[in-house]
Image: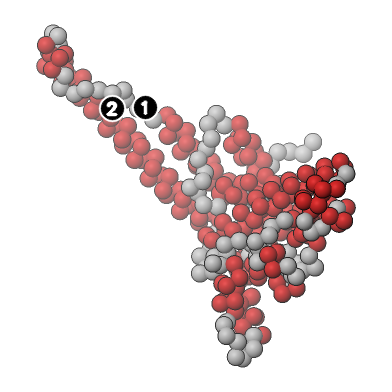
Amino acid sequence: MSATTDTQATLSRLATADSPVPLSHLGEVEPWLAAATTGDFELPDDVLAIVVQAEHLAAESAAIVHPSQHQPADVHALLEGQTVEEILETDDLASAAISRRDRALSLVRSAEGLLVALARDAFAPHRDALVVGPLREAVAALLTRAREMADKLKAYAPDYGDNLLAGGSPAELKLWRDSRILNRDLDILQQAWRASFSASGPDLHPQRPGGYFAWTDPQAVRVADLRLGHDREALRIAKERGEYRLLSPSELEPLLAEMDRTLPRHSPTNARGMVRADVCS
């Protein structure tokens, strides 16, 4: 039996926590945790350390005591026999509890704001390695499975769903349903990729995985919706002749330079304009 990895231990803690740990404000953290779950790969230690800090802040936030409602300077209490000193002492205690609560909330919120920046810094040295390594491996393995399914369902291509519903056997319909899991998983992997590309800082932020961001040779992709990332059907992507390979942030500028070198002299736009028009708007 293999030992539990640090990433697996982190995912297990999050899954079994009494209350959900807020991670959506931490940029790349949540999508990459989902991708690691889907692709069964490891995340860097400094990224996992951000999750530990988020768990600690969530626990501290939950432990903050919220005082009950208090009516200060309660004249009815004075008329009912309490002394001014007793009433003021109660007011002082209530005011102190409220102030302590507010300072605790402010402290936690400030720490959460700092953690957003720390999360971005934690991912910065790893973005390219994560995309080029485990993410691409997970996508390639997924598309290999999708290709095998597509071969078995080739009689129903390209509109698999409608055609299968019209004439598919029970076994073929089950295979189609199983392939929907691949679509879901591919979307999870693509979301992690897009989160890192957007966080990396280039002025070209892909709105979807298509064009030069997803295909090594987009012009070889025959179907426009597939080429531009509008159609993300795993079976159709797997059967395309072009290679589907998500671009890493550091690969963008060399790609643009190479494209500019090969463009005709009187081209109406440069490489950056071509890429932007494909999937950045």
Side (left or right) of 230 relative to 156: left
- Furthest toward the bottom, the residue is 265
How many numbered marks have been drawn onto this rendered protein structure? 2
Q: Secondary structure at mark 2?
A: helix
Number of residues whose C-alpha sits closer than 10 Å to that of mark 1, classed few (under 14), some (14–19) or many (20 or more): some
Q: Residue at x 50, y 56 (%)?
A: 121
Q: Earlier in the sequence, mark 1 or mark 2?
A: 1
Side (left or right) of 100 relative to 197: left
Q: Residue at x 64, y 88 (%)?
A: 264
- Against 276, is 156 above or below? above
- Against 107, is 193 above or below? below
Query: Could you say where residue 31 lies in the image, as x and y percent from the top left?
Result: 59, 49
Quadrant for the N terminus in the image: top right
Q: Residue at x 77, y 39 (%)?
A: 2
Which residue is identified by label 1? 65
The kind of residue on which mark 2 rests is: Ala
When asked about the image quadrant of residue 265, the answer is bottom right
- Furthest toward the front, the residue is 166
Nearest the viewer among 279 and 49 is 279
Query: Could you say where residue 176 lies in the image, as x and y percent from the top left?
Result: 80, 47
Labelled pair 1, 2 in contact (Cβ < 8 Å): yes
Which residue is identified by label 2? 97
The kind of residue on which mark 1 rests is: Val
Query: Could you say where residue 181 lies in the image, as x and y percent from the top left?
Result: 73, 46
